[in-house]
Image (tube, helix red, strand yellow):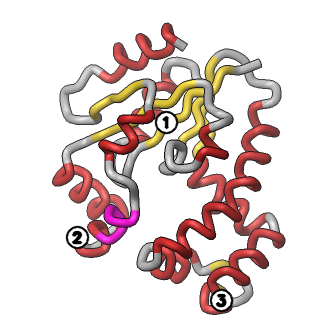
Amino acid sequence: MAKVLGITGGIGSGKSYVCGVFRSLGCKVYDSDSRTKELYDENPQILAGLKNILGKGILKNGRLDKKAMASIIFRDRSLLEKVKEFVYPFVIEDFLRWKRWKRGTVVFESAVILENEYVRSFMDKTLVVTAPLGERIRRVIARDGSTEEEVRARLASQCPDSQRISKADFVLESVEGADLESKARHILELI
């Protein structure tokens, strides 16, 4: 049975980059954000539940309008929490099917591992990826064309790094020049 390393961090912290480092070292990576977006389209039960929580305004031509949903949930933390509580059992079920035949260490990438005890319970160890605030904002603006105000709103909806770090087994700072590969190898030795 595979060991599970949960990799988390705030928006723009470099989670995906760090997951790529672990992938290059032979780990299989489950990207929960990407897979969740696929599940929205694949599972009508998820779409119906989201419509019940957030209203019909999240639909466009009968499909989920992810941008409309994001604009709602990142302004209202209680709705964000309701969506997470509803969606994550579906994601974990999908993850467990995915990892069933995997060996060694697999990586579960998600922004909410340490904020959600249900999700955290499926992890053997957790790693928080951090980066300086200004760098995070620059990364997100460059990645998806958001405004600085939009990025700051999303950052405000997430728990602070200090809270994540206090619950994590490992911490990596994703900054230019950091030797992330050797640090990742060391973490794999410790799992």
The numbered disc on residue 148 is 2
**Distance from the alpha carbon under mark 1 to that under mark 2:** 25 Å
Label 2 crowd bin: few (<14), some (14–19), many (20+), radius 10 Å: few
Q: Are marks 1 and 2 in contact (CB under 8 Å)?
A: no
Q: Could you tell me residue 190's position as x and y percent?
A: 49, 10
- Return the residue at label 3: 55
Residue type, label 1: Ile
49 relative to 184, above or below:
below
**Distance from the alpha carbon under mark 3 to that under mark 1:** 32 Å
Q: Are marks 3 and 1 in contact (CB under 8 Å)?
A: no
Judged by its main secondary structure, the magenta piece is: helix
Q: Could you tell me residue 139's position as x and y percent?
A: 27, 54
Range of residues picked out in magenta: 153-157
71 relative to 116, above or below:
below
Quadrant assignment, res 131: top left
- Return the residue at label 1: 7
